[in-house]
Amino acid sequence: MTESAIAITGLTYRYRGTKRNAIEAIDLELQKGEFLVLMGPSEAGKSTLATCINGLIPHFHKGKLSGDVVVYGKNTREHTVSQMAEDVGLVFQDFEAQLFSTNVELEVAFGPENFAVPRDEIATRIDENLSYVGLTSFRHRPPATLSGGQKQKLAIASVLALQPKVLVMDEPTTDLDPISKMGIYEITGRLRQRSDLTLLVVEHDTEEVLEADRIALLQDGHLIKVGPAREILQEVDLFESLGLMPLGIARFFKAMGAETLPLTPDEAVAAYRSAGWSISSECYEAILERERQLEREVSAREPLIHCRDLEFSYPGGVKALDGITLDIFKGDIVAIVGQNGSGKTTLAKQFNGLLLPTGGEITVHGKTTREQGVFKLGQSVGYVFQNPDHQIFSETVFDEVSFGPRLRGLPEPDVKARVSEALAAVGLEGTEQEDPFSLTKSGRQRVAVAAVLAVQPDVLILDEPTTGLDYGEQRGMMEMVKHLNENGSTIIFITHHMWVVAEYARKVFVIKDGRVLLEGTAREVFSHEQELSIASLRPPHFIQFTNRLGSTMLRPAELVECLGGATA
């Protein structure tokens, strides 16, 4: 019989000062060497459960705990966090908060040094773990100079250097581009081959959990279902009911009435061919013609934002933008995508004067950003930052949303009208007197959007609007953005979520090393998989599957339509 690594029985926990249990009556057992993924919507209790494994609950986070967590015979109630750290390594969701040393190798050495590991052994562990995560050549670099994916790899290496028997990773790929995500999961895949290491990973992205042994689904602190990964991933209706994103391939085949649902592009192609289906060329051409017609209509307008040979270098000579030429037209909805550090945010900040070009030209409404200045540009180009907590500062939602109109000297009746209109646009009517920091991350993001909308800009820029949100919140945010676009707002958004690009962007700019590598409609861009890979991007699995059929479909409903099937 396989040895039990983690045994959780009757586990219930409530944070101090809250009125409901974060997790309730959890019974779960992990065998030695198993790879289990925890999935669930926001506030399901995933991070709370993960934190219970190494004793941070109950020893660091105070609250009411009942039930037991036993890891290799150690009950977390009876052992300190440092004692549990001998067996359990934890990589936090905010992995950057885990890094504090002055260079990479010192970061990896820190844990073993605190456990009094001999110096020669520490040197061996540094070499082994930096090699394992592919950071050997970065050993003397300060962690702050690494990319997001490299920082995440360093956090993993520093935990592995302690040689834990259990590794817990809380949403390890949240802020990473698709290829960096693949890099982290390649490491996870290798770790899975180690019979001495048990893996527990909290994850939102369904495409990244196909290699897990089992999946555990949580909702409102309750364990809803546990089972083999492939069986759980076929439960499209269950995923949708929990607010989780089903695999696009599984969703398509379920809509077509398939009994067994393929999960990967290879399996999907084989099942499609076995079924003898064929895409209607007339239907596909009609989809393309609708896009071409919209392109003609949009491109006939005057560009709101006009960039020609745009360059920007940060102090010290680091060139972030290198000859960007593009136009953004009134009423468009545009995605800017690329790997971490490609120049996406630097480019977006040029549009509203937060940064000014060091070469080339950028105009908004026909005037250069330099001659307009950031205050004037703020009236026509609104910017919502990736982290709403960096943007929100008022004590009430009303004061936050009214700040911009008041700053511009509007009469109070007009201010109140704009606040009401902006809150209605983001679905936050009735929250005027609430503390914005009491809202969820999604709620705070909406407040930040409303605060920008109240100034009534022509262009709305959203930097990673779906980061840190679960699938239901992501879709809710993007449906709101789509509604704003349909009502006349020009939208520019930066994202790492390729399904968001597929479903909501009309025009896409792919940025690589400060240059435009690809541009076109979402369908055109996603049809160029090889070029996308150069930019550390890849289409969602469903689109990869349809590319291999010779017709790029952006969502399951399109393929169902062109096969004459049901709806998806």
Image (cartoon, helix red, strand yellow):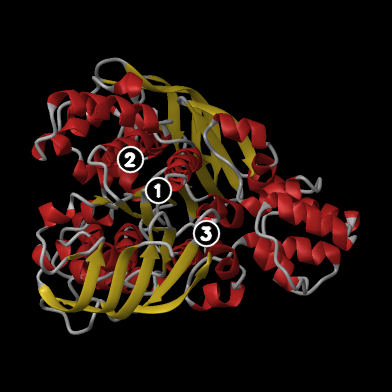
Spatial CA distance of label 2 from label 3 is 20 Å
Residue beneath the point at 11% across and 78% down: 17
Q: Name the residue under label 2.
A: 152
Q: In the rendered view, would you say 563 is above or below 490?
A: below
Measured as percent of width and height from the top left, residue 11 is found at 25, 78
Residue beneath the point at 85% across and 55% down: 273
Measured as percent of width and height from the top left, residue 465 is found at 40, 55
Q: Nearer the viewer, residue 528 or 378?
A: 528
Secondary structure, mark 2, is helix
Q: Which of 466 and 421 is in front in this view?
A: 466
- Whether residue 262 is visible, yes or no, is yes
Q: Which amino acid does label 2 sit on?
A: Gln
Secondary structure, mark 1, is loop
- Mark 3 touching mark 1, by CB under 8 A? no
Spatial CA distance of label 3 from label 1 is 12 Å
Q: In the rendered view, would you say 20 is above or below 445?
A: below
Left or right of 280 in this view: 442? left
Quadrant location of the C terminus in the rendered image = bottom right
Left or right of 38 in this view: 443? left
Q: Quadrant of residue 119?
A: top left
Q: Which amino acid does label 3 sit on?
A: Thr
The dot on residue 173 is: 1
Left or right of 272 in this view: 127? left
Spatial CA distance of label 2 from label 1 is 8 Å
Q: Few, some or many C-alpha atoms within 10 Å of disc 2 (few <14, some 14-19, many ≥20)?
A: many
Q: What residue type is labelled 1?
A: Thr
Q: Which of 488 and 279 is in front in this view?
A: 279
Q: Mark 3 points at which residue?
A: 206
Measured as percent of width and height from the top left, residue 563 is found at 84, 64
- Mark 2 touching mark 1, by CB under 8 A? yes
Q: Quadrant of residue 157?
A: top left
